[in-house]
Image (tube, rainbow, N blue to C red):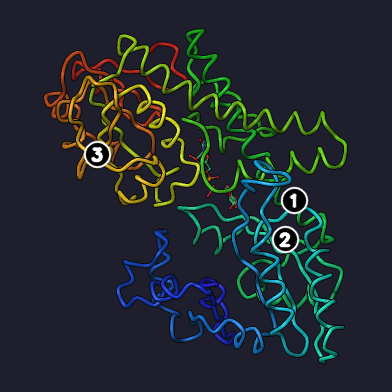
Amino acid sequence: MAVIADRCPEIQVAVVDINQARIDAWNDADLSRLPVYEPGLDVVVGRVRGRNLHFSTSVEEQIALADMVFISVNTPTKSKGLGAGQASDLRWVEACARTVAQAAAGHTIVVEKSTLPVRTAAAIKTILEAAQQQDGQQRTFSVLSNPEFLAEGTAIRDLEEPDRVLIGGDDAAATEALARIYGHWVDAAKILRTNLWSSELSKLAANAFLAQRISSINSIAAFCEASGADVREVARAIGTDSRIGPKFLNAGPGFGGSCFQKDILNLVYLCRHFALPEVADYWESVVTLNTWQQHRIAQLVVQKLFGTVTGKRLAVLGFAFKADTNDTREAPAIRICGDLLEEGAQLAIHDPKVVPAQMARDLKQEAAEAADALNGTGSWALAQSVEEAVAGADAVLILTEWRQYQQLNWQELAARMRRPAWVFDARAVVNPEAVRAAGLTLWRVGDGEG
Ligand code: UGA
C-alpha cells in the first residue's frame, strides 16, 4: 500500500487495522521503529505518510469511503479442527468480508490480497451478496484476486519492478480499475488477467514450485556431502541450462518464512479434497524433505561434536528465516536450535534484527544463563555481537546469510573459542580457506570435501 501511495499520488490509501498498538507503531514519528523491518520501506513510508497514505483504526468509516478494499489479513495453517495442520485458517478473511459487507457504501471492489485457498473468492462473494440482500441497502460488490509475489528483504524492489502483476476476476470493469492502478508504474505487458480460480491457484503453485526447487537442491546437497561433490558446482552446472535457470538454487538449512510451508500444505489439503492423493503426496514430500534437512543439520552438529552437545556452548549466528528481515516465522533456526536445546546445548544466539522476546517465543523458553552446564538442560542467551557469541564456544553455526557473517575475521574469532572448534556453515557464506587457516574445522552445506 505504501508503494501504491508512492506511485499514485492522486489516490488516497487508508490502511486500517483493529489493533491500535500496531497502527500506533505505523504512525511512529521515528521511522526506524516501524513494525516491519524491510530495506527501503521506511523511506517510502516517510515520503507518503500523511500525504496520501494514512494508518488508522477507523475500519468501518474507511470502508464506507473506499472504492476498492484490499483484504490483506493473515491466513495461517489451522491448528485444530477440520484440516488441522494443513488447511488455511480463514477466520480473519471471513471476518473482514463480513465487516466490508456491513460497512461498504455504493459499489465496492473487494480485492483478495491475502494468499487464499482456491475458490475462497466464492465464499467472499456469497458473504457480500448476502449482506446486499439483507438490509436492502444500495450496495454492490465485485471480487478480484490479486495475489502478492514480493519476497521479504527485497519487497520494495519486487513491488517497484515486479516480474508480473496478476489480476483474477470476471468483472472486466473492476479488473481494469485495478490494472489502471498498477499501470502507473508497471508495463502493460506485465499485468496478467486470468479468471478468479486460476489467479488463486497461481499463487499457491508459484510458491510450491519455488519451495520445490529449494528441497530439490537441498536433497542434492545431502548427496554431495555423501559423495564428495560440491553442491555449488552442481548448481552452477545445472543453472546454466536456460530451462532450469540460475536463481533459487542455494542449498541451505531449509526454507522458512510464513508462506512456503503453509501454501504447500494448503495445496496438499486441497488435492486430497479433490481426490488427488498422488498429487497431494508429491507436494507434501517437498515439506517433508525440508523438515528433514533441518533435523539433519542439528543431528550432524551433535555427531561431529563427539556425539554430545550437553553443556557445550554453541554460537548461533542468525535467527531470521533469511537475511534482511526481522521475520522468524518458520525460520530453520527454530527447529535446529530446538533440537540442540533438547540435546542440552547452551546456545548464544546473535541476529542483527531479531529481538530476544521473539526468540523466546519461538524457542518456547526464556533466555537464561545455564546454572549447571552438565545437568542436561539446554539453555539459550542473546549475544549482542558475534564476538560475544563465540567467546568460549565449541562451535559456530551460521543459520542466516546476513552480509556481516560473510566478512568475519576468523583469526580473531578462533582465538576466543574453545578447541577443538568447529564452524557449521549452513548457508555457505564463509570463506573456507580463511576458516581453515584459523585452525577451525569446517562443515559447509553441500560440500563433500568438508
Ligand atoms: C516467498 C516467495 O519468494 C515470494 O514470491 C512470495 O510472494 C512470498 O513467499 C509470499 O508468498 O509471501 P519469502 O518467503 O519472503 O518469499 O522469501 P524467499 O526469498 O522466497 O525465501 C524463502 C526461504 O527459502 C528462506 O528461508 C530462504 O533462505 C530460502 N531459500 C531461498 C533458500 O534456502 N535457497 C534459495 O536459493 C532461495
Q: Cβ–Cβ below 8 Å for labels 1 and 2?
A: yes
The residue positioned 18% from the left and 25% from the top of the image is 372
Is 449 drawn above or below residue 196 in the view shown? above
Q: Amino acid at mark 2?
A: Leu
User: Looking at the rendered structure, which numbered label has been put on residue 166?
Assistant: 2
Q: Is mark 3 within 8 Å of ligand 1?
A: no
Q: Is mark 1 within 8 Å of ligand 1?
A: no
Instruction: Report the Cα–Cα distance between label 1 and label 2.
Output: 9 Å
Looking at the rendered image, the quarter that the C terminus falls into is top left
Percent x, y of residue 382: 24, 42
In which of the image's four quarters is ligand 1 placed? top right
| Residue under numbered circle 3 | 381
Dot 2 or dot 3: first in sequence order is 2
Disc 3 crowd rating (10 Å Cα; few below 14, some 14-19, many 20+) is: many
Instruction: Report the Cα–Cα distance between label 2 and label 3.
Output: 44 Å
| Residue under numbered circle 1 | 202
Percent x, y of residue 36: 42, 61
Label 1 vs label 3, nearer the camera: 3
Q: Amino acid at mark 1?
A: Ser
Percent x, y of residue 267: 74, 43
Label 1 SS: helix
Asked if residue 49 lies left or right of residue 418, the reply is right
Quadrant hosting residue 9: bottom right
Quadrant hosting residue 60: bottom right
Label 2 SS: strand
Looking at the rendered image, the quarter that the N terminus falls into is bottom right
